[in-house]
Image (tube, rainbow, N blue to C red):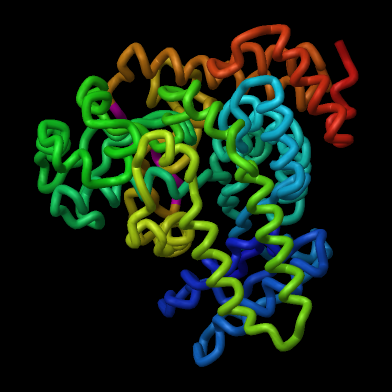
């Protein structure tokens, strides 16, 4: 089988390739096409993958290319991991928002909206290209904002595009470990949108173990989300939120911490990755070792400001390991290609799963996956507090899609103004002005 990775020069591509190296079953991926518009980044990642493959007799062949059509033709799977505007764009997204006193983050709030406005037109173009050149391919989307981009692509690819995220996987794994359960055997009752979801139950052999966790302050304080949100708040909710909900529940503290930080997360990653790719231009540099050290630093500093606000301390060693989205992607590909049925938390079209949203809305829920696709599992209704957030953010996503489709500036303003973390229509208008100044690619927002 052929896997095409769009954004093949991206820093996390070796995680995906590492997962493929561990798959030796019949029908596995045997060819990987890496497509990227940046030849230097593509060459750097290809070097890392070559070192990973040493000593693996059946390692998938890697073909770097700057020709999109060549990369797509004959693909069985297309993995989308593009970053429109690069990390410099992310850093600008964060700074413009923080200057207006609202959250700057790449998927949440103003920063996420700006990223979506830049990314959706490109993602739609790719979806159309895939539909023409590789109509039978399954598309696995990891491009952020993952739920929004998956929904945009689904308008052209239908149910053949599936979004993945490592946040629910990591959360479920942490909860299971705290409860002494095997994460591989536990059923995670998770529901919401991408980066806006809650674990409402964790069932082992039919028994829900989450009430035992919520009733034990010591257990709640023993893992990252427990320390991040606090035991009292988790017991009040009766659920464990995705870590990204910290931006909503503790917004004022998060904004202040980001404003006081010497450098935004995007700027840190921009500088860090520029250093990595610069070092990789030296033929003598140990590619895999250089990449691994950079990755370890990246993971250790993930959501550092939020942990500082909550006094949550450093990340645990187990959370620095790989095994997140790349393992989800591998399990998803196996299920689709070989009918190895799997239960995975994925971003898929609603199809009546959540009655508060229409059928085409992309949600993030447990799915049963087989050769016919990913099928969302029926879930209990959302509590009212979650309904409010989910429907408000979905309205924002729909406004972004409208703006990207029509070039409507008023739709873009509406997207910012309706977001729960933007507190004024006037601020929303200034955000649109600020983002169009720093991102030439947003010049398409030229209609009323």
| Camera sees residue 173 | yes
In the displayed structure, does residue 316 sit left or right of residue 433?
left
**Image quadrant in which you'd find residue 35:** bottom right
Q: Is residue 377 magenta?
A: yes
Residue pictured at 76% horizontal, 61% vertical = 36
Q: Quadrant of the C terminus?
A: top right
In the displayed structure, does residue 132 sit left or right of residue 185?
right
In terms of depth relative to the viewer, which is nearer, 291 or 149? 291
Q: Where does the magenta region start and end?
A: 372-379
Q: Is residue 376 magenta?
A: yes
In terms of depth relative to the viewer, which is nearer, 135 or 321? 321
The location of residue 283, given as percent across then percent down, is: 75, 86
The location of residue 203, given as percent across then percent down, is: 17, 42
Q: Quadrant of the N terminus?
A: bottom right
In the displayed structure, does residue 327 sit left or right of residue 448?
left
Residue pictured at 57% horizontal, 77% vertical = 30
Residue pictured at 33% horizontal, 19% vertical = 382
Q: Is residue 34 above or below residue 300?
A: below
The location of residue 223, given as percent across then percent down, is: 27, 46
Q: Is residue 381 above or below residue 378?
A: above
| Camera sees residue 401 | no
**Image quadrant in which you'd find residue 99:** top right
Q: Is residue 109 above or below residue 268?
A: above
């Amino acid at each position: 089988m052929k896997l095409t990775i769009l954004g093949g020069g991206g820093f996390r591509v070796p995680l995906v390739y590492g997962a493929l190296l561990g798959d030796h079953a019949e029908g596995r991926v045997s060819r990987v096409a890496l497509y990227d518009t940046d030849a230097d980044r593509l060459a750097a990642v290809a070097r890392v993958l070559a070192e990973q493959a040493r000593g693996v007799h059946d390692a998938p062949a890697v073909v770097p290319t700057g020709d999109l059509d060549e990369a797509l033709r004959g693909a069985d799977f297309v993995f989308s991991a593009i970053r429109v505007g690069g990390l410099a764009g992310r850093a600008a997204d964060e700074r413009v928002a923080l200057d207006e006193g609202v959250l700057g983050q790449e998927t949440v709030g103003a920063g996420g909206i700006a990223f979506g406005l830049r990314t959706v037109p490109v993602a739609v173009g790719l979806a159309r290209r895939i539909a023409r050149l590789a109509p039978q391919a399954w598309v696995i989307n990891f491009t952020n904002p993952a739920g929004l981009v998956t929904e945009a692509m689904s308008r052209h690819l239908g149910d053949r595009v599936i979004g993945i995220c490592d946040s629910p996987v990591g959360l479920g794994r942490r909860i299971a470990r705290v409860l002494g359960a095997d994460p591989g055997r536990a059923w995670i009752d998770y529901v919401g949108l991408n980066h806006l979801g809650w674990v409402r139950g964790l069932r082992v052999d039919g028994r829900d173990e989450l009430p035992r966790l919520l009733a034990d302050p010591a257990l709640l304080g023993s893992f990252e989300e427990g320390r991040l949100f606090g035991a009292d708040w988790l017991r009040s909710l009766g659920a464990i939120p995705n870590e990204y909900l910290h931006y909503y529940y503790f917004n004022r503290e998060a904004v202040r911490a980001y404003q006081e930080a010497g450098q935004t997360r995007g700027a840190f990653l921009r500088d860090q990755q520029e250093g990595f790719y610069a070092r990789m231009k030296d033929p003598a540099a140990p590619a895999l070792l250089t990449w691994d050290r950079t990755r370890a630093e990246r993971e250790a500093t993930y959501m550092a400001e939020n942990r500082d606000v909550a006094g949550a301390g450093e990340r645990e060693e187990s959370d620095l390991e790989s095994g997140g989205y790349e393992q989800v992607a591998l399990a998803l590909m196996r299920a689709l290609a070989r009918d190895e049925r799997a239960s995975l938390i994925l971003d898929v079209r609603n199809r009546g799963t959540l009655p508060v949203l229409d059928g085409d809305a992309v949600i993030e829920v447990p799915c049963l996956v087989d050769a016919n696709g990913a099928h969302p599992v029926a879930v209990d209704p959302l509590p009212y507090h979650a309904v409010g957030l989910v429907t408000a953010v979905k309205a924002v996503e729909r406004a972004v899609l409208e703006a990207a489709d029509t070039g409507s500036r008023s739709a873009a303003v509406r997207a910012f103004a309706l977001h729960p973390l933007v507190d004024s229509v006037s601020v929303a208008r200034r955000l649109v002005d600020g983002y169009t100044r720093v991102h030439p690619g947003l010049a398409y927002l030229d209609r009323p």
